[in-house]
Image (cartoon, rainbow, N blue to C red):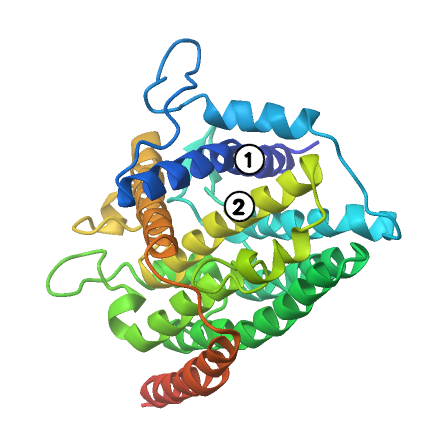
Amino acid sequence: MSFELIVDLAKVAFLIGAVLAVVPFLTLAERKGCAWLQDRMGPSRVGMLGIGKRFGLGQPLADGIKLIFKEDTVPAGADVFLFTLAPILVLLPALATLIVVPLGCDIDLLGHRVQLQGADLNIGILWFLALGAFSVYGLALGGWASNNKFSLMGGIRSTAQLISYEIALGLGIVGVALTTGSLSPREIVAAQGGSLFGVPGLHWNLFTQPVGFLVFLVACFAENNRLPFDLPEAEPELVGGYHTEYSGMRFGLFMMAENAEMILLSALIVTLYLGGWMIPGVDPASLGTGWLAGLMTAGCFATKVAALLAFFILVRWSLPRFRYDHLMTLGWKGLIPLGLVNCLLAAVVAVW
């Protein structure tokens, strides 16, 4: 087995392990953030090894134990195979898509140049769009296989919503591709390393494509089924939507998939519009390929992702749910025409 293959497998394993480790604590951050916004304490009874009881640091472990030992029921008349497959189809694409996201600058490892990226695909953005479509199947199959009318309605809603906003999401990406001339996440990040306002590493697509950023950001909320776009779940109307009949670890997989996709979408927003691992004020050419440079750039990337995750949480607990017809109107009559105009302007500028 070659050195390169071993390194690639190690990077993929590390990425998946890191996301699965962060997801439970992201749930804790969401509950504490909700409590802070509502002037409550949130989880504050379970510590971890006697540490952090006040902050509920042991709550993710307690939740995991509860889901593992909770009775895993299957409704009468359900399609057992599809009922089991649905949450897997939602979780796996979110994990697999992360491999195309560059996390930091290249480093030297045992005389080899190693990229802080699972796989450097020159069509990495298309990889994201292709795998992202699989989550639609998971939600739709979960709703249909449950043999429950509320679940079926949630599955139908999710299909219409995700397909509609996938178009807006793609248009946000097309604007970036036209501006940078590439579909490779690595090259898109490299194109944002120039100077802006005299500050190196600040030539972000956020400033050159502000309309595309807005379209992409709103579409990300809809793709993740989060408030104010959680119509496929909509507890007051559909009980829980596509996952109404799920319990135990099958339900846990749906929750893990939602948080993993939130991490993925935040990482993509950072990559496409916020300069990726570029450190504002630092010339990328001066970083070199040492371990310190790798840690600094990966830390910068993680900080940007963490800020976006906090923004996702803030929006969820601040805005009310859209009405379904308003949701579709915003997508088809608002974001899609806006995205098309933005792509046209980006094409004109690129040709000019």
Image coords of residue 313 (percent x, y):
37, 49
Residue positioned 41% across, 77% down in the render: 175
Q: Which residue is mark 1?
A: 20
Amino acid on which the number 2 mark rests in the picture: Ala
Q: Which residue is mark 2?
A: 260
Q: Secondary structure at mark 2?
A: helix
Image coords of residue 328 (percent x, y):
51, 79
Q: Residue furthest left?
A: 198
The residues bearing labels 2 and 1 have C-alpha atoms spaced at a distance of 8 Å
Q: Residue furthest front?
A: 236
The first of marks 2 and 1 along the sequence is: 1
Image quadrant containing the C terminus: bottom left
Q: Residues within 10 Å of mark 1 (few under 14, many from 20)?
A: some
312 is higher (above) or lower (below) than 18 = below
Quadrant in which residue 150 is drawn: bottom right
317 is higher (above) or lower (below) than 59 = below
Residue nearest the observer in this picture, 42 or 86 = 42
Image coords of residue 77 (percent x, y):
89, 52
Residue 137 is at least partly visible in this image: no
In the picture provided, is 101 more to the left or to the right than 55? right
Residue positioned 36% across, 24% down in the render: 44
310 is higher (above) or lower (below) than 339 = above
Residue nearest the observer in this picture, 133 or 324 = 324
Tell me, for residue 121, which label it has, or none. none
Residue positioned 49% across, 71% down in the render: 169
Quadrant in which residue 217 is drawn: bottom left
Q: Are the residues tagged 2 and 1 within 8 Å (C-beta)?
A: yes
Residue nearest the observer in this picture, 17 or 328 = 328
